[in-house]
Image (cartoon, rainbow, N blue to C red):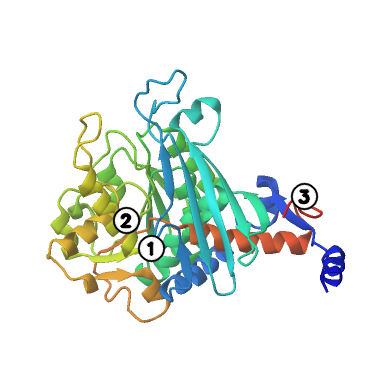
Amino acid sequence: MRRKQRRNEEKMSYPNIDFLYLNEEDMIKAGVLDAAGCIETMRDTMSLFGKKDFLLGGPKADEHGLQMNFPQKSDIEGFPLDDGPDRRFMAMPAYLGGRFHVAGQKYYGSNSHNSALGLPRSILMVTLSDVDTGAPMAIMSANLLSAMRTGAMPAMAAEYLANKDSKVLSLIGPGVINKCALMCYMEVLPDIKKIKIRGSSSASATAHAMKKFIEEKYPHITDIEICDSLEAACRDADVISEAMSVTKEKMEEFKLEWFKKGATVFSMGSFLYRKYDDFLNTTMVVDNYGMYKKYLSNFIARGPVDELGNKREWVIMGIHFVHLVESGKTGRENVLDLCDLVNKTRQGRKNHDEIVMCSIGGMPIEDLSWGYDCYQKALNKGIGVKLKLWDKPYMK
């Protein structure tokens, strides 16, 4: 009996494990910049989020990711130190169900000094894995992937929250994220006639690069204004799209009186606002309420002053909404969940004149879903390089 079992084990075949590697050029060929497609994928993603058909990392499956920061000082010779904003590494594991049924993670390193080297601030990769075996399916360049999924989220939300006759779009922070967001807004807001741009100054190179991008890609938009102040960028805008770095120094503070009746404000980065109660006069919307609740609790635990003695600010819009609920100034039901709008269990914009404030913090399930769809297109078109993990495992 044992000899027969041994013979059967010897005859067992171990399947090859190949995975697909997709560089940035491959990702472009696979449609990573397809704005309309990305919007629909984000709609599917948020629908699944609302149905709880997902997992994030951590013991409670609700962690945005695990971040590693460098210390200000160390007694170890040659130890890497925090020598500027945005120096960190982050791993963001997740599972997404539905038609995707895929696990994986986004992983990146970030350093603001990268610009001096001609590199993006963050360099990102996404890995897709088989849910049952854990075997890798794909490893892909993810800078464009991450930017597109981030930009597609507010555009998808705009279909539920922005007035259909919106004509003036304001881009606060004219970097890669808002460039991708612009591509997506133009898919869902066909009546846009004017675009405002606010960079670090009116002479900002990125602001002028954004203007050139608009002129080349959307020649029918002839009214493009580079604004010399945050107020000028917000005034008279129907849709405001904010995508500034959360570590930006000397941030400008927003004021509610700058927003016209009926304005829709999307924040994907730093939204400095100190008069929290003003939000009670708006319609508040979030992509993941629990994520902002955790951010708030971490902020309170760490205190209002950082390790260097600098005052810390709440610069993520959703934290303000949670604070208003936690302090008893409004009810949880008054902060709308974007997934409920997608799944049609709650109504978004109720009238033309209300001011809508929507916080988009981003989740790794969005990277997985858009990465998965690009992966499927790459398979169908024969794009990318197949790499072998093994013919059979050397040890098991």
Q: Measured from the top left, where is residue 204 in percent x and y? A: 41, 33
Q: Of label 3 and label 1, which has the lower sequence position?
A: 1
C-alpha gap between disc 2 and disc 1: 40 Å
- What is the residue that sits farthest to the bottom in this orientation? 345
- Return the x and y of residue 273 as percentages of the image width and height: 21, 49
Name which residue lies at 21% across and 32% down: 310
Which numbered disc, 2 or 1, marks the residue that appears first in the sequence? 1
Q: Is residue 111 left or right of residue 135?
A: left
- Is 334 positioned to the left or the right of 201 in the image? left
Q: Amino acid at mark 1?
A: Lys
Q: Residues within 10 Å of mark 2 (few under 14, many from 20)?
A: many
Question: Looking at the picture, does residue 208 appear above or below residue 396?
Answer: above
Residue 364 seen by the camera: yes
Classed neighbour count for the residue bearing mark 3: other residues with Cα under 10 Å, few (<14), some (14–19), many (≥20): few
Tag 2–tag 1 contact (CB < 8 Å): no
Residue 281, image x, y percentages = 17, 64
Q: Which mark is residue 60?
A: 1
- Quadrant assignment, res 60: bottom left
Residue 237 shows which numbered tag?
2
Residue tagged 3: 394
Q: Considering only vertical position in the picture, is 332 above or below 112?
A: below
Amino acid marked by disc 2: Ala
| Residue in the foreground of this view, choosing between 217 and 220 | 217
Picture residue at 45% right of the left edge, 69% below the top: 46
Q: Amino acid at mark 3?
A: Tyr
Distance of label 3 from label 2 (alpha carbons): 62 Å
Secondary structure beneath label 3 = loop
> Marks 3 and 1: which is nearer the front?
3
